[in-house]
Image: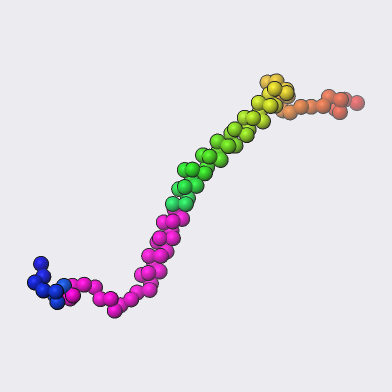
């Protein structure tokens, strides 16, 4: 342990050497960390929410189609107008 305050000053880093490159590097690291957090937010919150919404939309459409056509060949392949295909 140093005996005096003067000896503490000699151990402290010099404030005279201002390094703007170091500040730029730290700002870049913070920016990259913020982008990573946004990517995680998107992957963990937005993608499942969108999948849930899309699944509910598709199931509503599929159920309406099932009610109209039944669960048979037309359900999967679509309705075919027989009057238009026969001559």
Q: Position of residue 29 (x, y in %)?
A: 40, 61
Front-most of residues 75 and 5: 5
Q: Quadrant of residue 19?
A: bottom left
Q: Main secondary structure of the magenta part?
A: helix
Q: Which residues are magenta?
A: 9-36
Q: Is residue 16 visible?
A: yes
Front-most of residues 15 and 85: 15
Q: Position of residue 83 (x, y in %)?
A: 86, 25
* Residue furthest left in the image: 3
Q: Is residue 73 visible?
A: no
Tell me the residue at 55%/36% (across/down).
52
Tell me the residue at 52%/44% (across/down).
46
Tell me the residue at 82%/27% (across/down).
81
Q: Position of residue 42 (x, y in %)?
A: 50, 47
Image quarter where the C terminus lies is top right
Asked if residue 35 is among those painted magenta in the image, a careful observer would answer yes
């Amino acid at each position: 342990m140093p005996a005096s305050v003067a000896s503490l000053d000699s151990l402290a880093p010099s404030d005279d050497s201002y390094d703007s490159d170091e500040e730029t590097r730290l700002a870049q690291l913070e920016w990259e960390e913020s982008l990573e957090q946004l990517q995680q937010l998107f992957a963990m919150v937005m993608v499942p929410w969108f999948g849930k919404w899309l699944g509910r939309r598709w199931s509503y459409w599929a159920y309406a189609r099932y009610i109209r056509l039944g669960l048979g060949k037309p359900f999967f392949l679509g309705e075919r107008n027989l009057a238009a295909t026969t001559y």
